[in-house]
Structure formats: C-alpha cells, structure tokens
Image (tube, rainbow, N blue to C red):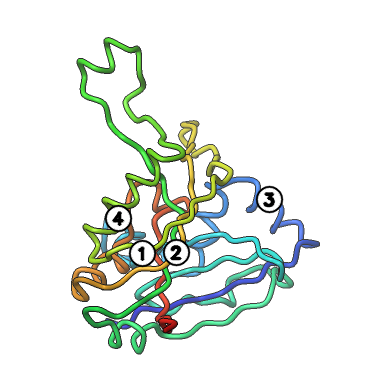
Amino acid sequence: MTLWLTRIIPDQRHRDVHRDGDDAVKLHHRIMSLFPDDIPSTEPRRHLGILFRTETSHDGDRILLQSNREPDLTQLPAGYGTTAAKPLTPLLDALRKGLPVRYRIAANAVRKPGSTTRALYNLPEVVPLTGPHADEWWTRQAEAAGLALATLHSTPLDAAIGNRHDKQRVQHARTLFEGTAHITDPDLLRARIREGIGRGKAYGCGMLSIAPRRETR
C-alpha cells in the first residue's frame, strides 16, 4: 500500500486558513474533506492512514499530511495555498537496521495515573507531561518504534484546541521532539510511521517523520 506525503503551504491572507489554524477540529475536518466520504469503515481517519502536523519555519507555515491514499487537493477552497504530493514508498523501502536518521514528531506526551493515584492527588484521567518527563515518554515511544535515539531536542507547542459538533472540548498538549537516531527494527518503524504514535492523531499529533542522514567522521 502506497503511503503519500502531501505538503500544503497555506496563504495566510485566506479567511479559511485563519479559521482552520485557530481550531484543531476545523483543521481536522478540512483534512478529511480531501478524501471520499463513503469509506467503508467506522473509523475513516484510521482506515485512510491520515496523520498530519502543522509546522512553522523561516519559510512560513505549512501542513504536512500523510495518508495511504492520494488526497484530492482540488477540494481545498480556491486560493487556500500551494500544494505538492509525493509517495513515501522509496523512503520506507530504504529503511534498514543501523541506518542513521533524523526524526521529527509533534506528539501528545501524557501519562494515565491509576484510579488510586488520581483519587489521592485529585488528578485528571490523563496528565500532560512536560520537560524531562516528556523527554522520557518520547524515549520510550521511540524505542518501541524501532529507534535508538542519539540526540533529542524538545520544544513545547501550543495545544491543539477546538470544539466538536457534540460540544465536547478537544484539547491535546503538544511537544515537538526532533533529533537523530539509528534504526533498530525497520519493520517496526515502518508500522509506527503508518500508524502514528500516541494520542490526538485526529488533531495534528503523532505523525513521525524520518529522513536518512550522513554521519560525520
């Protein structure tokens, strides 16, 4: 099954871009609108392998979208932004044990305290992690995804926030993890790239990006 990577560079002058950027639920619906709505599944996002991440760089904002079907970019509003799509198959096929890579993921690092601990300390069901605790969470996730981390840099991001149609509030804390690693299990890594990592996948969390790197001698 081909995995696609799509880049959308939104035009910040467009009204819909601002609406989507301010609301994680609206952006989720925008992404889903690029795919057929007759998917034979009760979980169309998972069925289509849809993951995405928003990024801000010196070149401006962009949306990176991953899916197992090529999106219909004509469904974007006119003038929404510039787009490009390519298959990730060559990258995935090139993964091998020991290969040095760069990685990046915006993830919802959390822990779920047991009922006794929650009652004792009056904690919510899910507790966002920050700082060294978030780094420890990602280190465990990376190892479980077939990566041995060499370097790790983490940056807190704004939470993914929005309101669903059923009036329920969506809020997922996000941390950007990036650095270098070596692949320990290529098959496991391919699976985790396709599936995503952690919670909040529908709202811009969990998309793991990998790129081969040259080691300096």
Residue type at mark 3: give it: Arg
Element assignment for label 3: helix
Image coords of residue 118 (percent x, y): 28, 17
Relative height, residue 190 to residue 53 (above, below)? below
Quadrant in the picture for the C terminus:
bottom left
Chain-order first, disc 1 or disc 2: 1
Relative height, residue 213 to residue 205 (above, below)? below
Element assignment for label 1: strand
Residue 114 as seen in the image, left or right of residue 22: left
Q: Looking at the rendered structure, which numbered label has been put on residue 19? A: 3
Residue type at mark 1: give it: Ala
- Give the CA separation, mark 3 to mark 4: 25 Å
Chain-order first, disc 4 or disc 2: 4
Quadrant in the picture for the N terminus:
bottom left
Q: Which residue appears farthest toward the top when viewing the image?
A: 120
Image coords of residue 154 (percent x, y): 49, 51
Residue 158 as seen in the image, left or right of residue 202: right
Q: Residues within 10 Å of mark 1 (few under 14, many from 20)?
A: few
Chain-order first, disc 1 or disc 3: 3
Q: Looking at the rendered structure, which numbered label has been put on residue 150? A: 1
Relative height, residue 199 to residue 96 (above, below)? above
Q: Looking at the rendered structure, which numbered label has been put on residue 93? A: none
Residue drawn at (24%, 82%), measured in percent from left and top? 96
Q: Looking at the rendered structure, which numbered label has been put on residue 43? A: 4
- Asked if the residue under mark 2 is in contact with the one under mark 1, i.e. CB atoms within 8 Å, the reply is yes
